[in-house]
Image: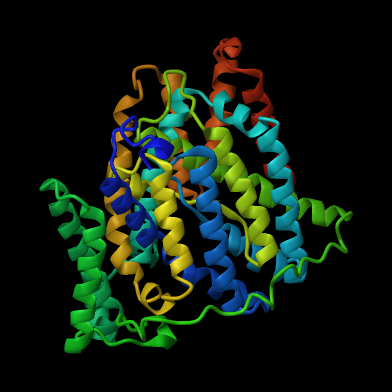
């Protein structure tokens, strides 16, 4: 493992990589429950989607390790699966078979773009200040995700607001929703305490302790599961299970609308969101781990992008929506993960989940929320590297950070950051300091907002 993963060169060891891999998987395991629940709305078989998601995640993560030796883990992208189900199938009226075909075509295009260095060129064209801003923006973004997953932040008259414990007590929902919000807050403090004490595996321990507290609350009657409200038992229904058959979704792509304009629009939408979500995640996580070189480039990025493309293509064949690099990879990086061994461990756990699904599906979102919040803190530390005295570069960075969190999208944050960076440099008569590719990207983003 030392020879293949270059552990000493990357200032890590097997134990650290194992903990990092397990931590990343634990923060991502929710996708195994969420993805089938979303895609089944299209008529897809939930069991087959579960199997496809686990297998595609394992395959793509192994490819990341073998092709790039980077600690990034992949699975079915959140947002992309919602676009697949609610926009393409339920909104535009396509069958899920046609939607899978669009994902497959997107994957093939990605492979071509990765081999021809187009995606790598885009990565390298983004200025270092914006790359730092992406890392900070992702920190805010995943903190917001954690707060929402735990229901600490909920819908309200002010768009979002804090969960009301008084309302839960008077409305009779304290023993379902209220107690889980309280557990998430307690779990965040426990994880923060472990971080302050420099306890090895602090984020993973935070997840497990918060989950255990939930189990104790359920056993004592303080937490009462209510499946109708999507509050499920925290105690695994079993240990072992046999994987569901892939037959209902395997190779079920329908290419009958391949040459239609609408089909090409769908492919482009998948392509656009995936390419910039992936680049944003790679930039953010690599910045946090200090993996970028002096020029702001990521060694091994070509292999990382290729692994991402393979995952998307294979996932479509198996029967799941777009596979992409997960921002939750930052939780493993925060634990010290620096090589592909982290991705191998997480990938192996995705494969094992096929046989231990009752355990993994019992991990509640309120237990992983503290991990996302604390990782958000770690990624926010990058904000100190932005030169705030240089307003010409700092303002686009600020716009990028805000857009990513408040628009709930990594790709939108990158888009607004690139457009504002290019436009402000032009207005200030410093257009020559911006690379031609940045202008091309700015025009593409603007056209995307006009026509999509």
Q: Residue 40: horizontal and vertical position, in percent?
A: 61, 77
**Figure check: 346 above or below 243:** above
Quarter holding the N terminus is top left
The residue under the point 20% across, 53% down is 202
Farthest left residue? 197
Q: Nearer the viewer, residue 200 or 134?
A: 200
Q: Nearer the viewer, residue 58 or 384?
A: 58
Q: Is residue 162 visible?
A: no
The residue under the point 48% across, 73% down is 354
Q: Residue 168: horizontal and vertical position, in percent?
A: 26, 79
Q: Residue 424: horizontal and vertical position, in percent?
A: 54, 21
> In the rendered view, how is the structure colored?
rainbow
**Figure check: 162 above or below 123:** below
The residue under the point 56% across, 72% down is 51
Q: Nearer the viewer, residue 381 or 289?
A: 289
Residue 138 located left or right of residue 110: left
Question: Which quadrant would residue 307 be assigned to in this image?
Answer: top right
Q: Is residue 159 visible?
A: yes
Q: Residue 132: horizontal and vertical position, in percent?
A: 41, 30
Residue 166 located left or right of residue 51: left
The residue under the point 57% across, 37% down is 303
Question: Which quadrant would residue 156 be assigned to in this image?
Answer: bottom left
Q: How many marks?
A: 0
């Amino acid at each position: 493992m030392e020879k293949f993963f270059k552990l000493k060169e990357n200032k890590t060891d097997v134990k650290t990589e194992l903990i990092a891999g397990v931590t990343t998987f634990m923060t991502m395991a929710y996708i195994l429950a969420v993805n089938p629940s979303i895609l089944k709305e299209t008529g897809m078989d939930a069991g087959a989607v579960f199997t496809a998601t686990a297998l595609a995640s394992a395959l793509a993560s192994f490819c990341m390790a073998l092709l790039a030796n980077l600690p990034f883990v992949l699975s079915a992208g959140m947002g992309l699966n919602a676009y697949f189900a609610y926009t393409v199938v339920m909104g535009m009226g396509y069958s899920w078979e046609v939607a899978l075909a669009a994902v497959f075509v997107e994957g093939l295009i990605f492979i071509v773009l990765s081999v021809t260095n187009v995606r790598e060129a885009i990565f390298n064209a983004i200025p270092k200040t914006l790359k730092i801003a992406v890392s900070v923006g992702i920190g805010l973004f995943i903190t917001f995700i954690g707060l929402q997953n735990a229901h600490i932040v909920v819908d309200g008259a002010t768009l979002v607001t804090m969960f009301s414990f008084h309302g839960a007590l008077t409305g009779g929902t304290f023993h379902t929703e209220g107690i889980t919000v309280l557990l998430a807050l307690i779990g965040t403090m426990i994880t923060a305490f472990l971080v302050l004490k420099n306890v090895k595996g602090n984020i993973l321990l935070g997840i497990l302790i918060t989950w255990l507290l939930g189990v104790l609350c359920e056993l004592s009657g303080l937490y009462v599961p209510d499946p109708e409200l999507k509050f499920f038992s925290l105690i695994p229904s079993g240990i072992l299970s046999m994987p569901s058959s892939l037959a209902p979704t395997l190779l079920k792509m329908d290419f009958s609308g391949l040459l239609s304009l609408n089909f090409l629009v769908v492919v482009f939408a998948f392509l656009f969101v995936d390419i910039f979500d992936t680049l944003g995640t790679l930039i953010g996580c690599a910045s946090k781990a200090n993996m970028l070189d002096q020029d702001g480039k990521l060694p091994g990025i070509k292999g990382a992008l290729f692994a991402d493309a393979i995952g998307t293509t294979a996932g479509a064949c198996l029967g799941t929506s777009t596979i992409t690099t997960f921002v939750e990879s930052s939780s493993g990086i925060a634990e010290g993960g620096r090589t592909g061994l982290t991705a191998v461990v997480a990938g192996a756990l995705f494969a094992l989940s096929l046989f231990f699904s009752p355990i993994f599906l019992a991990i509640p979102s309120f237990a992983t929320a503290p991990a996302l919040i604390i990782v958000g803190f770690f990624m926010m530390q990058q904000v100190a590297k932005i030169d705030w005295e240089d307003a010409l570069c700092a303002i686009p960075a600020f716009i990028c950070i805000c857009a990513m969190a408040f628009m709930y999208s990594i790709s939108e944050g990158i888009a607004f950051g690139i457009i504002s960076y290019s436009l402000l440099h032009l207005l200030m008569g410093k257009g020559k300091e911006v690379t031609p590719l940045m202008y091309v990207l700015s025009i593409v983003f603007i056209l995307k907002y006009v026509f999509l």
